[in-house]
Image (cartoon, rainbow, N blue to C red):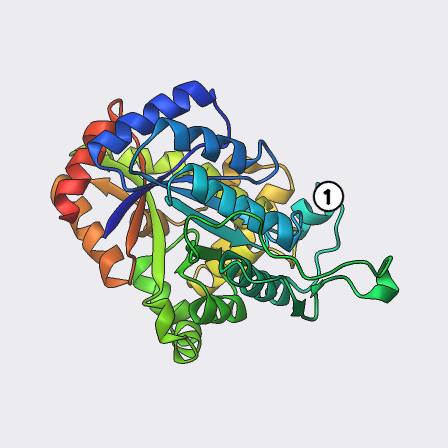
Amino acid sequence: MKLAMPLQYAGNPRETADQVAGLEKAGLDQIWVAEPYGFDAVSLMGYLAARTETVELGAGILNVYSRTPGAMLQTAAGLDNVSGGRVILGLGASGPQVIEGFHGMPYDRPLTRTRELIEILRLGLRREPLEYQGKVFTLPLPADQGLGLGKPLKLLNRPERPDVPLYVAALGDKNVAMTAELADGWLPFLFHPEKAKDVWGDALARGRAKRSPELGPLEISAGGLVAIGEDVKPMLDFMRPMYALYVGGMGARGKNFYNELACQYGYEEEAKEIQDLYLSGKKREAEAKVPLEWLEAGNLVGPASYVQERIAAFREAGVTSLQVYPATDDPAATITQLKEWLA
């Protein structure tokens, strides 16, 4: 099992790079850079590539709407080149609030768009001409939709690797099945190790049944807050705002993927209360309704023996890359301790 860590959305890039370099020396295997509707992830990933040597750099995530397939191909190949083959390209559909509100694009056919983008990226990374006929993407552009001068082009530069790992952030049944079929890795969110099989087991099995042996096993990257000690359980409260934000406010009523996930976990009553409170502006009350059981299961907070039990639970659930948020004054020391336990 690898050890990974997501970065916060904002921060001084020089300080961030210093931190990541220190975590790399402590044993961190992967760092994930988010891109919701703040700074782009690619700029920071390029900067981190120059300041690090071994840590893998994950885009967590680039949405499948705001970059054309050609631009996404250039991004993947360019980042992999400057990092010496250390990039993981995390992809996802994001949500209609971001795609339609921030990018001004219709949130349509997210699964088809993701599938076709993966196929085009694999084609381009093999440095084959971009010639593709899909339901969303057609390359080159048909003559009746432009000047008729387009022709199949291949990437000018030779990619560092023809198989840059492509991970997908997915929660819905069909999306998870598609991810298990096509992607190199899966990025679930608000992961509950003990309930994951009940929610996604069938979808993962359907996808794996269609999976090409050439892809190898599906990687799974998930985790949560880490605090090790005898009196650290109150640290779980620091995760309440994030859980409440996603379950209650990330989307509209009736169109919130995270609220649906909470219901699938068996927290239907709490999910409704959290959303009602959050959308009415009562965020603190919403945070208080996040089930403690979910917080305890999805994070690694407690005495050393308990944290080791949680690591085992994530491993048992199929997680191959444990994502952690060290809640400590010395994150590097926490990474070193976790790395020893993972070994």
Q: Position of residue 218 (x, y in %)?
A: 35, 65
Q: Is residue 260 above or below residue 284?
A: below
Question: Where, by quadrant of the figure, is residue 249 drawn?
Answer: top right
- Label 1 sits on what residue type? Gly
Residue 185 is drawn in which quadrant? Answer: bottom left
The residue shown at (43%, 19%) is 14
Task: Return the residue nearer the eye: 129 or 135.
Answer: 129
Q: Residue 211 vs residue 174: left or right?
A: left
Out of 96 and 250, give the one closest to the viewer: 96
Please tell me how crowded label 1 is: few (under 14), some (14-19), or many (20+) other residues with Cα within 10 Å.
few
Query: Judging from the image, what secondary structure is the residue with disc 1 in?
Result: helix
**Residue 104 placed where, x, y %?**
76, 46
Across and down, in percent, residue 161 comes to: 41, 52
Q: Which residue is mark 1?
A: 101
**Residue at x 34%, y 29% (from the top left corner):** 20
Residue at image point 27% right, 30% down: 23
Above or below residue 12? Residue 66 is below
Please say if 181 is above or below 285: below
